[in-house]
Image (spheres, coloured by chain):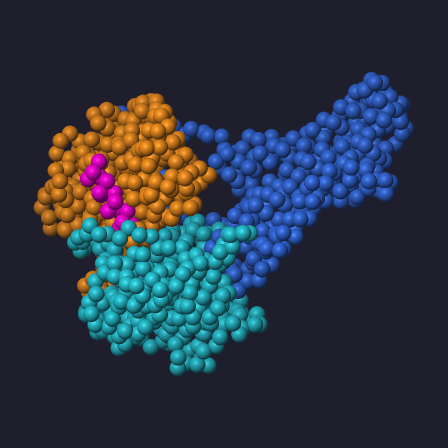
Chain colours: A cyan, B orange, C blue
Amino acid sequence: MTEPNTGQAVKLKKKPGRRQPAAPDSTGPLLRTEKLTRHFKIGGGLHRRTLHAVDDVSLSIGAGEIVALVGESGSGKSTIARLLASIYQPTSGEIYLQGRRLSAIKSRADLLGYRSDVPMVFQDPFSSINPVFRVSHGIERSLKLHRPELPRAERRAEAIRIFEVVGLTPGADVLERFPHELSGGQRQRVGFAQALAMRPKLILADEPVSMLDVSIRIGLLNLMSKLRDDEGVSILYITHDIASARYVADRLVVMYAGHIAESGPMEDVLARPRHPYTQLLVSAVPDPRADVRVGADTDRGEPPRVIDPTPGCRFRWRCPLAIDTCHQVTPVLTELLPDHSAACHVATADAELKAF
Amino acid sequence: MSSALADGIGQTAGTSDPILQVSDVSVDYATKSGSVRAVDGVSFDLGRGEFVGIVGESGCGKSTLLFAIAQLLSPPAGLTSGNVVFKGVSMVGMTDSQLTAIRWKNLSVVMQSAMNALNPVKSIASQYKDAMRAHGVRSKTEISDRSAHVLKMVGIDAEHLRSYPHQLSGGMRQRAMIAMALLFTPDLVIMDEPTSALDVVAQRSLMVQIKELQAELGFSIIFVTHDMSLVRHFSDRIMVMCAGQVAELGGTSRVFGTPRHPYTAGLMDAFPSIKGQRVFLTGIPGQPPNLAAKPDGCLFAPRCPKVMPACGTTSPPLYQVDGVDVRCLLYADGSAP
Amino acid sequence: MASTELSAGLGTPITPSTGQPGIQPGRARDAAARTGVALGRLFAALRSNRKASAGAILLAFVVILAAVPGLIAHDPPRAEIYGRSLGPSSAHLFGTTVYGQDIFSQFIWGARETLIIAVVSGVLSTTLSVIMGVAAAYLGGVADSGLNLVTDTLLVIPSFPLLLIIAAYLPNSGVAVLIAILVITGYSYGARQLRAQALSLRRRDYLEAARVRGERTAYIIAVEIIPNMTPLIVASFLGIAVYNVLFSAGLQFIGFGNPNSVSWGTMLYWAQNNEALAIGQYLWALMPGLGIAILGAAFALLNYAFDEIGNPALRPVRRLRVKRAR
């Protein structure tokens, strides 16, 4: 049950996807994780310790929607992307794509199938494309690996078509360029084109606009909306910038120190943030059009590196509302309002608790 | 010429002698196919204790301008015209030893990426010691006292003096850089995108810290960034640059309240808002101009939503409108449309 | 920092792409076009850099000698039919050896085997360096440790004692064994260098992108990583070529390889055995030494030049003057 949108000039309507996913399980969410966990061993020899990058993350992404995964650096959001892209193996927990477990995939063909369903777009436009080849290299490899039924001539035509879908026109021209001849924004569009060539169900976009100029970002964000509306693709938009998340995403998942702090419909979470950390993030966003009063109690804390943590809420040292339970029991993500959950002992469904 | 010392937020910034006068500065890069003008005729004054933000996209010349002011340009870049007067003395003709005397004591620079600016194999204390000894401080107690003091000023515990840069988080490294810039309480601190590698929360806390330090120590700040929203709440005046030229220059509240140059308006519109209605934004279409082959007329014309026929042939000068300098033919007859 | 800002502001999409217009895809044609463009750029770079020009000229000199020795020297190099220990004359430009062979012919014909040894061992060495170094870097973990163990062991074993042992077991070994020794003892330095560079490339996003795309590991190493290391691979080759020229001459000097073949190293062997300097046949020793020096210098100069071409920071700073308008 989502809040009705208040804006008129809103480009939010979701057209039904042109391709219905022919899925074994089309009733549940498109992608679901269950207690997904990833630890890293750090230090050597006598000081072996465990870095808890992601702990017990259960999130779900539906078909044809954009979900924003927001958090500071060290929150685990990039690790989640790499887990979903099968670059890392989970320490524990499961990933389900349309009801099928990722860990059950053994053969190379099946893994290729998963990779074509869940490709990734990377953050740095200057290092995400191989500089020695023309930009046609990546997309033609994608087509060759994941759509082998296309003969060579049609592959070329399809590459041109996809380039034009992402706004690189004339497609035939841009395909022949080298990466250093393109701007940062164009290179990110190439990244999306490579992902789109696989006919994906879900694109993992790891901070795709963070390294672009602010005025270029809007173009890429609009492209993401367009891909959702016209191509029926879901997108997991990973970012630390809530403002851009709000612009483009339908749902918001907030991560802190490897845990999910809050998740729910975008407007709902922004209007009534339940978790104190969400409130902190929302208050910290600079807005050129609004006046902001910077209080004397500005948070100066840093997100922790979670190494061998003790039980308890990981936000407790920065939280003005922390109580004793917060130091002893790790909060679990609980649904407070329909479809709107928060992992906080203090948060409730109704009360307007203002931490920041 | 130099713009009026317009109003700012709060204090009486810049009413006395300006601490820095940049007059008609131009910087060219010598390339194999001729000179490329990266900065074109930029002028502004900076008062004591004033915070000026310079904003623009990549390639607009803001970092080059910064380097020109700090006399850090090296071939193939060179200052081709104009003057930079700091505390009444022209910096352009100075010798290296004269510059060294000024640097860090009166004028310091905070670079863009702290991890690249801090030496990864030396502890923080050792780098501060280097800086102080390079400028004549010998006494060990004075060095360690001062180091601990500046770290405390930026909110870092003095025990981190022994840490190496990789042991500190991104936010702390950036603050350590700023502390280093304040070792001699300079009159002017130049900052080149010091927050670009930080998260939103660390960014805000750093800006607040900078502002507090400025209030306490009274130095002026030139702050270069591509993120307008960041300087909106902290700067007294703002300068918007486009293709090496000043597009708009004036008091922050005036510029943000009523952006006059279409580029400024476009930049502001590129920020989705977190409050209010969700509105479809378009950003600024097109690309920044090719500086090696500049078109005639206004450099922003190809991307301007309010372009007029005259814009293709006439290069607009800076007009003064309500105390704000605007480089746009829309204001040619002195009135706002 | 300022230069990246400049390049971003040059409106990069407006510049035309390199290569001819209208070129169709098709990987063979694309590769040929890229090679053509690369060769063109190579020539331009060689011409513009003084060290490169000098090195290229010296190398061309040796290559010509190796390619068409018969056109330059008309006497057979091994025939012992002339007067013994003759001084330089119009009939014998450099004189003759104590066996009655024409030294000038030997010098001209000797270039071929010397060059072949240097180039073949250089290519094989570099190939082995690439495989061992890049694979170790990309595979990481146990594979990395294992490959490094082999490489480091060979790095540490002193080559001459190894050779003497091998020479005791293979008394009549020919050029092939010589080349094998050079390769096995010489590849390890390059392997470490290439491994270091490959390690720095390993975390580049485009490699992760290739992995996420579903490419196999061997493909990623061969197609995505190695083309990015071309400057270092070429530099590695040139470096090992210098080493091989000198080392192979040294080996032949002590009698390794086949002393009956004609090369600059074997000329030195025979000259030394017959005390050429003592009997006044200076050119017999000097000319092959000069030849070896020329070839070694050629590779060394090209090596410096490639460093400068690949890394602009090493180029001599030509101060392009910016005129000040006052």
Residue B47 percent coordinates (x, y): 18, 34
**Residue A2 vertical placement versus B288 (above, below):** below
Which residue is at 54% across, 55% downward? C224
Quarter of the rendering containing residue B81: top left
Query: What secondary structure prevails in the magenta region?
Result: helix
Residue C185 colored in magenta in the image? no
Which residue is at 53% across, 74% downward? A104
Which residue is at 22% across, 31% downward? B20
**Residue C211 vertical placement versus C5 (above, below):** below
Image: magenta residue range? B203-217
The residue nearer to you, when weighing A76 against C54, is A76
Q: Is residue A261 left or right of residue B330?
A: right
Q: Is residue A295 left or right of residue A149?
A: left
**Residue A98 vertical placement versus C51 (above, below):** below
Residue A62 percent coordinates (x, y): 37, 74
Residue C50 percent coordinates (x, y): 55, 30
